[in-house]
Amino acid sequence: MSDIILSVENVAMDFDGFRAVGGEHGLSFNVNRGGFLGLIGPNGAGKSTTFNLISGVLKPTQGRVAMNGVELSSLKAAEIAGHGLGRTFQTPRAFPSLSVIDNVIVGSEHSEEGPLAALFGRWRPADVELHEKAEHALERVGLADRLHDSVANLSGGELRMLEVARQLNRDPSILLLDEPTAGVDPNLQVKLSEILVQLHADGTTLIVVEHNLAFLLNIADSVVVLQNGALLAEGDPDSIRHDPAVISAYLGADHET
Amino acid sequence: MTIYAIIIATLTFGAIFSVLTLSLNLQYARGGMINFGTVAYFAAGAYAYAIFTQEPPSGLDQYRFGFDMPWYVGFLAAGVASLLFALVTGWPTLRLRGEYLALTTFAFAEVFHSLLLNERRIGNGSVGLANVERPDPTTLGMSDTVGYALAAVVLMLVTAFVFNRLLKSPFGRTIDAVHDDEIAAQAVGKDDARIRLQVFIISAIPIGFAGALYAMITTLVAPAMFTAEVTFFVWIALVLAGEKTIVGAILGAMALVLFQELVKGVPFETVRGAQIAASVEEIVTGILFILVLRLRPWEKLSKRNAS
Ligand SMILES: Nc1ncnc2c1ncn2[C@@H]1O[C@H](COP(=O)(O)OP(=O)(O)OP(=O)(O)O)[C@@H](O)[C@H]1O
Ligand SMILES: [Mg+2]
């Protein structure tokens, strides 16, 4: 029996009566600890909504999500993040009031973050350490020379990398990335794939949503395919590539991946 | 009124209202919360101070409580009272945004005002509590007015200093992040509801202290002193001088108080002249308030949240 870190059980999500995720019987799949799951499917299949359900941004209409055996439905998004889940968003989210480096540091678990520590100035030593760590995370995603820049000056691809750096910096045990290569130039995509392979080797559990299958299917070790909110197929990348149902619903007949 | 008296009055009341604009600056410009019930926290501080320092009721007194404590106990009690009031009003309402929060805080303040007015056991109802106890600055060799002007300026500076320290720390960074994008802040483990409540409560404490000082200076607390006009006044001051900076918050309050003192200070030949001046002042305040409504700070806010 393999060790399951995340289980999605009969989950459904309705928006005003429209079932975005779940199909008829609810969506179920498991993610192995240390696994690298690719989550794919056509536009509107419910991939991002599934991420929102796992990370607590949305609460499911039915079903449950459990992480390390802990049921997540009663937890707030911030608490789920505190349990070691990291995620990025399909539309990158940055904090415009903060510099690039502060955008990353603010995501750290800071031991001296409260108002009293602020009043008595106890936060400085801890902050120096966090600063170095955040710098390192930004180096990894190619933003080392933008530390003190305003995020307003970053391109779309750079914002995406900033968000990745903010999550990397937190050392999450499970990391969800929503279309991390969209709008990112080829050089950085290579860098990103190296980072993901490294995280995978270090034991981080990864779930990645991508339309760039050439990127994803080469590094993921299992795949879940969604269509209209329901599970269409599940398996290793090779079997997914050749699955007739997946080819007709999503890949197309002349795909090359 | 001499120029000297105008300067002292402007410093005293300008500094007291600056404490309020500084708190709103923290709540609104940094925390993204519109508090239209500011006066209630001010009143809570003033009443707490009066109740803690006054003698127990006797004779015709309708109020129930008087603890006869020294002024500094009353002063601390004022901060605590405002803090508790912020906790009680903030906890259920801070989920609301923009104009909804503005309306609810306004309603809370109105309820509190009517409670002070109608529940005579708190503070003698509309009569209020007179002869509020206070320390005597002349023991330090200062005149009364100079002593209290100094106290108000010190309270203002300490408030500005403390808020500045908070904002320049990791706590301030987190406040900004929550304000910028609460979903992204949650994704890195920041409990936005808790942070907002903390900001709301912290910024209420100095308002309570300012209320205590106001009670000492006027030696009276009565519901008529704590109407929504006070809230409008500090909002006008804040928006006038630009709600973004600490210096702006102070300058706005000082300028508006100076304007009022100048109008009061004009030597009128006739009662009619004074009446006209008083109504002009009200009209100008009204126009300024309309301007604030026209500028609609909360719309800027909701646009930021939506984008
Ligand atoms: N907040 C919402 N309110 C109403 N409908 C929504 C909401 N979020 C998503 N949907 C709908 O749910 C469906 C699934 O959306 P979702 O964003 O999860 O798809 P996706 O698989 O991520 O697609 P894409 O590849 O285009 O990103 C879509 O039909 C979408 O319109
Ligand atoms: Mg999506």
Image: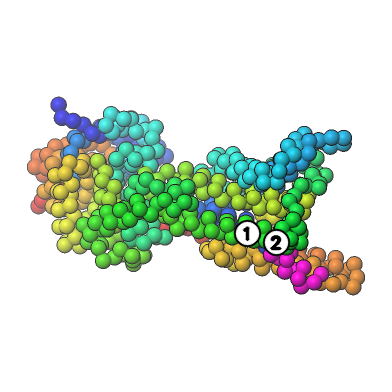
Helix, strand or loop at disc 2? helix
Determine the image quadrant of residue A139. Answer: bottom left
Callout 2: chain:
B
Helix, strand or loop at disc 1? helix
In this view, B176 is above or below A250: below
- Marks 1 and 2 in Cβ contact (< 8 Å): no
Residue stretch in magenta: B1-11
The residue that label 2 is drawn on is B149
Q: Say which of B139 and A134 sits in front.
A: B139
The reply to whether the magenta stretch includes residue B273 is: no
Determine the image quadrant of residue A81. Answer: top left
Q: Position of residue B278 (x, y in %)?
A: 81, 65
The residue that label 1 is drawn on is B154
Neighbours of disc 1 within 10 Å: few (<14), some (14-19), many (20+): some
Residue B288 located left or right of residue B298: right
State which quarter of the image contains the N terminus of chain B. Answer: bottom right
* Image point (36%, 31%), residue name: A62
